[in-house]
Image (cartoon, helix red, strand yellow):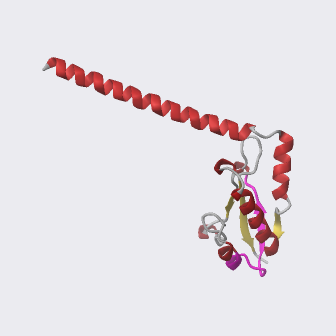
């Protein structure tokens, strides 16, 4: 009976060790991917990348410019890896601003319905929406009062 108990304890210890090693390899892999994502571009490339979107930023941006931004972001997202996609955000009702995009802003009909010419928009990037090397990873669009 003692031998069976010892065998079960050893087996459990081996399983725990395997789980911990697997978890360590997974975490290390995620960290490597993040470092790779943030180091693939030179500072000049990051500036050039960001400049494609900076032209749409401002406090009183027209609806047509916001719709063009959505098209540019969607085109970029279709042609890139998941980790390099740009998220379009709009603030929820708790802050008093209407949600302008669904989960991905890919639904142009939805965007056309809520981004209207009768309003202007505040388009910007929050400090936390840049990667470690300064590349844009999310853009926020808010409605403004006329």
Image: 20 above or below 98: above
Regarding residue 65, the answer to whether it shows in the image is: yes
Which corner quadrant of the image does residue 95 belong to? bottom right
In this view, the residue farthest toward the top is: 3
Query: Considering the image in quadrants, where does the N terminus appear?
Result: top left
In this view, the residue farthest toward the bottom is: 118
Which corner quadrant of the image does residue 102 belong to? bottom right
- Left or right side of 123 for 96: left
- Identity of the residue drawn at 67% across and 76% down: 109
x and y, in percent, of residue 108 in the image = 69, 73
Regarding residue 97, the answer to whether it shows in the image is: no
Image: 91 above or below 28: below
x and y, in percent, of residue 136 in the image = 75, 51
x and y, in percent, of residue 80 in the image = 70, 52
Specify start and end residues of the magenta stretch as a single range.
112-126
Q: Is residue 113 magenta?
A: yes
- Identity of the residue drawn at 79% across and 40% down: 41
Q: Is residue 144 magenta?
A: no
Image: 92 above or below 84: below
């Amino acid at each position: 009976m003692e031998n069976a108990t010892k065998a079960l304890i050893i087996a459990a210890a081996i399983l725990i060790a395997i789980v911990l090693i697997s978890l360590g390899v997974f975490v290390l892999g995620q960290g490597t991917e993040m470092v790779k994502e943030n180091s693939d571009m030179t500072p000049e490339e990051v500036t050039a990348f960001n400049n494609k979107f900076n032209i749409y930023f401002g406090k009183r941006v027209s609806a047509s410019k916001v719709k063009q931004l959505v098209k540019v972001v969607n085109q970029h997202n279709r042609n890139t890896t998941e980790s390099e996609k740009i998220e379009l955000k709009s603030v929820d009702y708790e802050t008093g601003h209407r949600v302008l995009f669904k989960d991905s802003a890919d639904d142009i009909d939805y965007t056309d319905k809520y981004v209207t010419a009768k309003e202007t928009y505040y388009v910007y990037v929050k400090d936390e929406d840049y990667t470690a090397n300064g590349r844009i990873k999310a853009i926020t669009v808010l409605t403004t009062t006329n």
